[in-house]
Image (tube, helix red, strand yellow):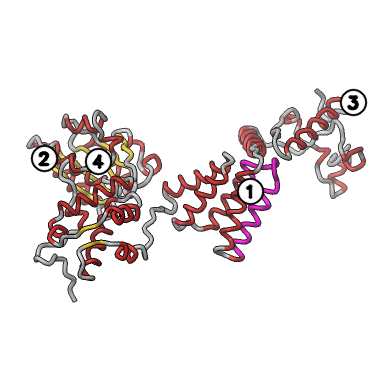
Amino acid sequence: MSISTESADGSPYQPLAARVRPTSLQDYIGQEHILGEGKPLRQALEKKQLHSMIFWGPPGVGKTTLARLFADQVDAHFIALSAVLSGVKEIRAAIEQAQKDRLYHRKTILFVDEVHRFNKSQQDAFLPYVEDGTLIFIGATTENPSFELNNALLSRARVYVLKPLDIAAIEKIIRQALQKDKELKQRQISIDDNTLQKLAAMADGDARRALNLLEIAADLAASKNQDEIDDKILQALTQQDFRRFDKGGDVFHDQISALHKAVRGSSPDAALFWFALMLDGGCDPLYIARRVVRMASEDIGNADPRALQLALNAWDVQERLGSPEGELAIAQAVIYMAAAAKSNAVYNAFNEVKADIAQLPSQEVPLHIRNAPTKLMKELGHGKDYQYAHHFENAFVPGESYVPEAFKDKVYYQPVERGLEIKISEKLKQLKALNESSTFQRWPK
């Protein structure tokens, strides 16, 4: 059985996104923040003074198209590699071709898609040829270059951030395709403004996805012997989930960061928004539940200890009952914590004591608070002069210390004047006063 890769007229099949790829900067839609009039990248392109660069952005925002346009603008030989499919052999062949082009005084643009998938040695292979001008390197990545590309390559290339396209830009791209694609024009495919806006929204900022949806919608219309893409056609398309959510990638981390900051900033509505958006994108509710527990200790702490218990309860409900009951319990915890009194005193104290311990040599436990289960340990002074707190008023021993002498003046936990920590602060101030006025001092001043 063979699979046809030809269109109806016998020519090799190309998806709509490839057929209508812009061939001039005037036809390129979006990314005005780097390509608008007077922007450095636009000026470099107009003056034909290109440099090596990295395009960082989500799928379908025009990274490959932009690289091809640059090659056309400066009349450069365009070599494209995919880091998913290419290895050392392909890299060497591309470099050899660039060296040949250089002999004939022609520039070479080497475009590497998904460049973050190359390992360090593969990325290093480009460096000498970028350095001596043999080629202009353009890499495209959906991942954060700071984490995925080595510093040597980053130092030789400028990073440009490409943003998801807004609905207006997607609408323009769809209209442009309807006007320029021969096949769609021959079939007289049409779409009204309202349906067009819905189709653009379904693309979720991805131009390639928008054009793929348009092509599928056109085929569905043809199967119904109609030339208009209407709401019924769109309903057939919505059976699939087109949300952009890269589990473990930058969008994922940005969204959980937004949720955490909304809780910290005491905005229940914003926190609920990001929680629902992550669920809509396919995030595991148990992951969010675990992060909510972190928020309870990091940003609320002892200002309202009930937040931690509520977060743990929500996690338990999600594990026991699943969705949607568990998600509702997590939403309850998120809203409660956003509205709760805030304190990062525990978080700060814990980080500070960890930093001190990491910098200092090992500390021995003072003799008076060591355990003494054997006769030998007692003879060695373990537990000697230990004062049992419950034998004292308010179960507190004025002047006593429970840390090594080197730490006797350290104060890590400093409660804030919010929530329950107001009372905790008052209690600690009273105990401090008793310590300072006591005639007994474990460690002399």
Could you tell me how far apart the alpha carbons at marks 4 and 3 are, in whole angstroms? 74 Å
Going from N to C along the chain, the mark reached first, 4 or 2, is 2
Going from N to C along the chain, the mark reached first, 2 or 3, is 2
Q: Which mark is residue 118?
A: none
Magenta region, residue range: 296-320
Could you tell me how far apart the alpha carbons at marks 4 and 1 are, in whole angstroms? 48 Å
Q: Nearer the viewer, residue 423 or 175?
A: 175
Please tell me how crowded label 2 is: few (under 14), some (14-19), or many (20+) other residues with Cα within 10 Å: some
246 to the left or right of 112: right
Q: Which mark is residue 138?
A: 4
* Residue type of the residue flagged with mark 4: Ile
Residue that mark 2 sits on: 101
Q: Nearer the viewer, residue 250 or 105?
A: 250
Going from N to C along the chain, the mark reached first, 4 or 3, is 4
Residue that mark 3 sits on: 439
Going from N to C along the chain, the mark reached first, 1 or 3, is 1
Please tell me how crowded label 1 is: few (under 14), some (14-19), or many (20+) other residues with Cα within 10 Å: some
